[in-house]
Image (cartoon, rainbow, N blue to C red):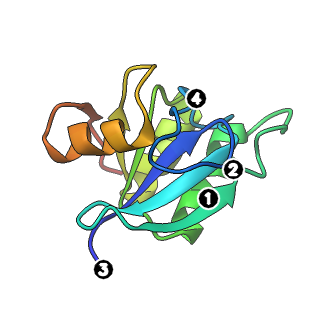
């Protein structure tokens, strides 16, 4: 298995579904093998309705899914810190892309990667 990437979606879908611009409040995470484009799983975001800590809760979910990277429109400061601590790459994708388009742009180096802070 290659690099596992989580892509934020508003609702369950596939690579043709539009990404959710939010990380911590995304409805679903689509887990995809970046090399084969195989969908590994779809994980409901249990933190989506949290009053506080949606970003850190979502980061914990990413850790449990053993992903190497996450694609979302934006990451809040607490999510950024949590994902940095976990060594999970963060890629910003513009709104309006499908999950497949965002994945292709990440693989091609056409998305902006947030720099991970070393702790």
Left or right of 45? Residue 8 is: left
The Cα atoms of the two marked residues, 2 and 1, are separated by 5 Å
Q: Which residue is mark 1?
A: 60
**Reading the chain from its start, which is encountered first: label 4 or label 2?**
4
What residue would you read off at disc 4? 22
Along the viewing direction, whichever of 13 and 48 lies nearer the viewer: 13
Q: Mark 4 to mark 2: distance in Å?
A: 13 Å
Name the residue tied to disc 2: 57
Q: Which residue is mark 3?
A: 1
Q: Earlier in the sequence, mark 3 or mark 4?
A: 3
Q: Residues within 10 Å of mark 3 (few under 14, many from 20)?
A: few
State the residue at coordinates (26%, 37%).
Answer: 115
Q: Secondary structure at mark 3?
A: loop
Q: Secondary structure at mark 1?
A: helix
Which disc, if any, is residue 7?
A: none
What residue is shown at x 57% (from left), y 31% (from top)? 20
Mark 3 or mark 4, whichever is nearer to me = 3
Proximity of marks 2 and 1: CB atoms separated by less than 8 Å: yes
Which of pointers 2 and 3 lies earlier in the amino acid sequence?
Answer: 3
Residue visible at 77% across and 40% down in the picture: 48
The total of numbered circles placed on residues is 4
Instruction: Give how far apart the Cα atoms at labels 1 and 4 are.
Output: 16 Å
Name the spot of residue 82 as percent of width and height, x first.
Answer: 52, 48
Q: Circles 1 and 3: CB distance less than 8 Å?
A: no
At numbered mark 2, what does the secondary structure look like: helix, strand or loop? Answer: helix
């Amino acid at each position: 298995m290659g690099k596992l990437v989580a892509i934020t979606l508003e609702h369950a879908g596939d690579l043709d579904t539009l990404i959710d611009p939010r990380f911590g409040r995304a409805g679903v995470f689509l887990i995809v093998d970046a090399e084969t484009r195989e969908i590994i799983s779809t994980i409901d975001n249990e933190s989506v309705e949290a009053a506080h800590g949606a970003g850190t809760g979502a980061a914990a979910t990413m850790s449990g899914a053993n992903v190497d990277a996450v694609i979302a429109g934006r990451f809040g400061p607490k999510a950024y810190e949590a994902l940095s601590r976990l060594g999970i790459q963060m890629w910003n994708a513009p709104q309006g892309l499908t999950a497949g388009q965002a994945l292709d742009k990440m693989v091609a180096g056409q998305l902006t990667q947030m720099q991970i802070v070393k702790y």
